[in-house]
Amino acid sequence: MRSGALRRRLHHGDVDGRRNENYETSGLDGLDEPLLGSQDYNERHSEGQKLEEIWDEEQRKEHLHWAFLFSNLIAQWAQWIANIVLGSGSFIAQLLHLPSNIQNGPSQKLLLPALSPLQEERLRNLQQRLGVPFDGSRLEHQDALKQLWRLAYPNRELPSLKSELWKDMGWQGPDPSTDFRGGGFISLENLIFFAKQYPESFQRLLHKQDGARADWEYPFAVAGINISFMLVQMLELQSGKPSSVAGIRFLELLGEDEMAFDNLYCVAFQMMDAQWLVKRASYMQFNDVLKSTRTQLERELALEDVSSVKDLPAYNLLRR
């Protein structure tokens, strides 16, 4: 019963999110632009395509997008009314006890409760990981890239560190080290963790096996770096101690699970792909999908019954 309810909450709850939301700067190497560049993909997909065809396709996608949002709104209202009729007492009580910053928007700040020694230690360790840039000249970083390839393609020969074959994984050029930028080494660690802990979901996303895909898909590996960067911003992990609901709730999760950041990364990646399919998005809409993913994740982190990453509704989408 609970699992089904959680899935409904995920699919019927604010898929689009706040379209005008702005990210706060996080101090990650001064990065102030999307990590997902468009040059290579624009070159590959603009050849032979007329402006009229692009415009017609965008109009069709916009029509489908708004039709879906309208049907979603109707479903949300129906569910809301049903909740009032069937259990008005508990429903209204939950509404009254929502944190004030969720009702007024996630930008409102809260006071951070006192952290336990364990939370303090795990937060320091995580922040130390965040401070490590990717360095293609370091052997351990090269080995990590090779490990990711072996996890992604166990039956394929390992290419050299500069090879066109890396594009198969969704790197934008033959040298993956040029794509990390502000993402840092932790974004590679996140991808490796995903491949190890949730191999079925990792493979399905890598090979785009779920749903009706766009002709112009997001590059898997670079999307993963974007997700790592988005989580660092959302959780305020480089700003000392967080003061947002999402950041404070994450520290609670960190007290329960030392790898909470990595597990949350896997949830966010799976959630992003689910929203990508719902929106029928293509490459140029990636940043919009990432923003709505952040919005949905913030709201799930604010749920009262979440005490671990596994309690998040979107966790049910992951497969090992």
Image (cartoon, rainbow, N blue to C red):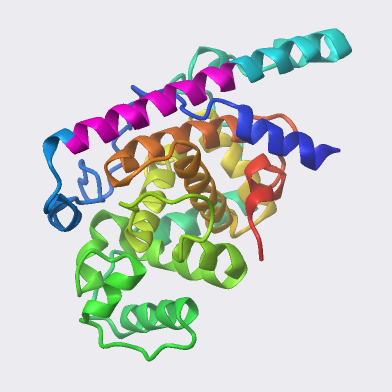
The relative height of residue 168 versus residue 3 in the rendered view (above or below) is: below
Regarding residue 116, the answer to whether it shows in the image is no
Q: Nearer the viewer, residue 243 or 265?
A: 265
Q: Based on the picture, tell me whether residue 57 belongs to the magenta stretch.
A: yes
Q: x, y (%) of residue 118?
A: 64, 54
Q: Nearer the viewer, residue 275 or 175?
A: 275
Q: Residue at x 20, y 81 (%)?
A: 162
Screen quadrant of the N terminus: top right
Q: Based on the picture, tell me whether residue 206 belongs to the magenta stretch.
A: no
Choose top left, top right, bottom left or bottom right for residue 74. top right
Q: Nearer the viewer, residue 302 or 71?
A: 71
Q: Residue at x 38, y 91 (%)?
A: 157
Regarding residue 239, the answer to whether it shows in the image is yes
Q: x, y (%) of residue 210?
A: 54, 55
Q: How many marks?
A: 0
Q: Residue at x 31, y 82 (%)?
A: 142
The relative height of residue 287 versus residue 105 in the rendered view (above or below) is: below
Q: Which residues are magenta?
A: 53-73
The relative height of residue 105 versus residue 137 in the rendered view (above or below) is: above
The relative height of residue 97 versus residue 234 in the rendered view (above or below) is: above
Q: x, y (%) of residue 92?
A: 77, 9
List the single residue furthest toward the bottom: 157
Q: x, y (%) of residue 256?
A: 69, 52
Screen quadrant of the C terminus: bottom right
Q: Taken as a whole, is the magenta stretch helix, strand or loop? A: helix
Query: Does 175 sit left or right of 225 as displayed?
Result: left
